DNA sequence: CCAATTGTTATTTA
DNA sequence: ATAAATAACAATTG
């Protein structure tokens, strides 16, 4: 599930515990989510530390502690929530940070998520040199065009999914962007016309902004259905529905695997 | 049993 | 050698 806005939403879920001390840590050391982590080190070092700051960038998340950094990637089905203590670990809870009042839970039933721990004050390697987010000024129209030229033989859908270029954009956001820009997802990046970049650039930023407002901006309480706040005017609400129709023109939507992922678009809305 | 899933990575292919 | 396509990863659901 988690793309740009969902990641930000889940980041906010742990915020009630900011400034508080982690009293103890629960984790399943055999968990696949800890495959690149020294779980003993994490278990030894995290208790006693202050939770200082939570950062999100694209699909990546990082929690700054007193003397270290906790990296979290939510993968395909990961989520974070904050429950009042006492809290009994549930199935697929891979990591729980306990403060005196809270249980900060990382749960992921599909185990594509990842947890990492970096000791020490200096920024970990994996939190350095993050690619510019589509909402930063560095993500310019010129940069977008250059990337399309550099990956000329890749479909535009496949390009939008690249995290080193469009951090935070995933399958549903890519479809939403292309639908709004009226571009077929299988178009080759190198064959876009110069006149098409302004629209594409605008739509990328628009979908990122709108998604953050509608999903992360709701200031969520406990595990709600994140999607209920997404308007019916978005492709999102129709793309998986059997017999789903384009919310703009009511044409039945097309679905096909492009760039390895099921993609959805409206044939009559293409420009 | 088969196919699907809003993600990433290692391996294979072009 | 580089870039793109594919398989694999795991659990669950229809």
Image (tube, coloured by chain):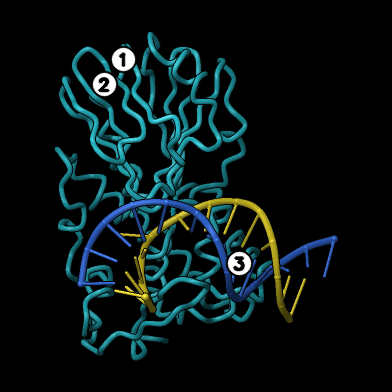
Chain colours: A cyan, B yellow, C blue
Question: In the rendered image, is residue A202 in sight?
Answer: yes
Residue denoted by label 2: A17
Vertical comparison of A262 with A71: above or below: below
Within 10 Å of disc 1 (Cα), the crowding (few <14, some 14-19, many 20+) is some
At 50% from the left edge and 72% from the top edge, which residue is drawn? A260
Residue at figure coordinates x 45%, y 40% from the top left: A33
Q: Is residue A191 above or below residue A234?
A: below
Mark 3 or 2 closer to N-term? 2
Label 2, residues with CA under 10 Å away: few <14, some 14-19, many ≥20: many
C-beta proximity under 8 Å, tags 2 and 1: yes
Q: Disc 2 and disc 1: Cα gap in Å?
A: 6 Å
- Element class at badge 3: helix
Please identify, in this view, whether the residue under mark 3 or under mark 2 is nearer the observer.
Answer: 2
| Residue A134 visible, this orientation | no
Chain designation of label 2 = A
Q: Which mark is residue A113?
A: none
Task: Kindly identify which residue carries mark 1.
Answer: A19
* Relative to A90, residue A229 above or below: below
In the picture of the structure, the residue carrying the numbered disc 3 is A145
Which quadrant of the figure contains the C terminus of chain A? bottom left
Quadrant of res A21:
top left
x, y percentage for residue A226?
A: 21, 52
Spot occupied by residue A195 in the image (x, y as percentages of width and height): 54, 78
- Quarter holding the N terminus of chain A is bottom left
**Depth-wise, is mark 1 or mark 3 nearer the camera?**
1
Return the disc, 1 or 3, that comes first in the chain's sequence: 1
Q: Quadrant of residue A9?
A: top left
> Residue A219's x, y, as percent?
19, 39
Residue at the (17%, 69%) spot, across then down: A232
């Amino acid at each position: 599930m988690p793309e740009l806005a969902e990641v930000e939403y889940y980041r906010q879920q742990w915020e009630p515990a900011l400034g508080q001390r982690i009293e103890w840590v629960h984790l399943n050391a055999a968990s696949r989510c800890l495959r690149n982590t020294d779980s003993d080190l994490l278990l030894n070092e995290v208790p006693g530390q202050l939770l200082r700051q939570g950062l999100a960038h694209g699909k990546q998340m990082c929690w700054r502690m007193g003397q270290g950094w906790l990296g979290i990637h939510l993968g395909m089905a990961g989520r974070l929530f904050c429950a009042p203590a006492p809290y009994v670990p549930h199935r697929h809870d891979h990591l729980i940070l306990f403060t005196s009042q809270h249980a900060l839970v990382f749960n992921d039933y599909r185990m594509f998520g990842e947890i990492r721990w970096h000791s020490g004050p200096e920024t970990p390697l994996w939190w350095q040199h993050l690619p510019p987010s589509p909402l930063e000024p560095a993500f310019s129209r010129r940069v977008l065009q250059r990337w399309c030229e550099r990956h000329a033989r890749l479909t535009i859908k496949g390009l939008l999914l690249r995290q080193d270029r469009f951090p935070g954009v995933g399958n549903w956001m890519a479809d939403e962007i292309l639908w709004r820009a009226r571009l077929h997802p299988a178009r080759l990046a190198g064959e876009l016309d110069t006149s098409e970049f302004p629209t594409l650039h605008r739509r990328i930023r628009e979908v990122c902004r709108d998604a953050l407002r509608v999903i992360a901006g709701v200031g969520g309480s406990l595990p709600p259905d994140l999607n209920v706040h997404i308007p019916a005017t978005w492709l999102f609400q129709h793309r998986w529905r059997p017999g789903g129709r384009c919310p703009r023109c009511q044409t039945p939507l097309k679905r096909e695997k492009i760039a390895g992922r099921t993609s959805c678009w409206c044939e009559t809305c293409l420009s």
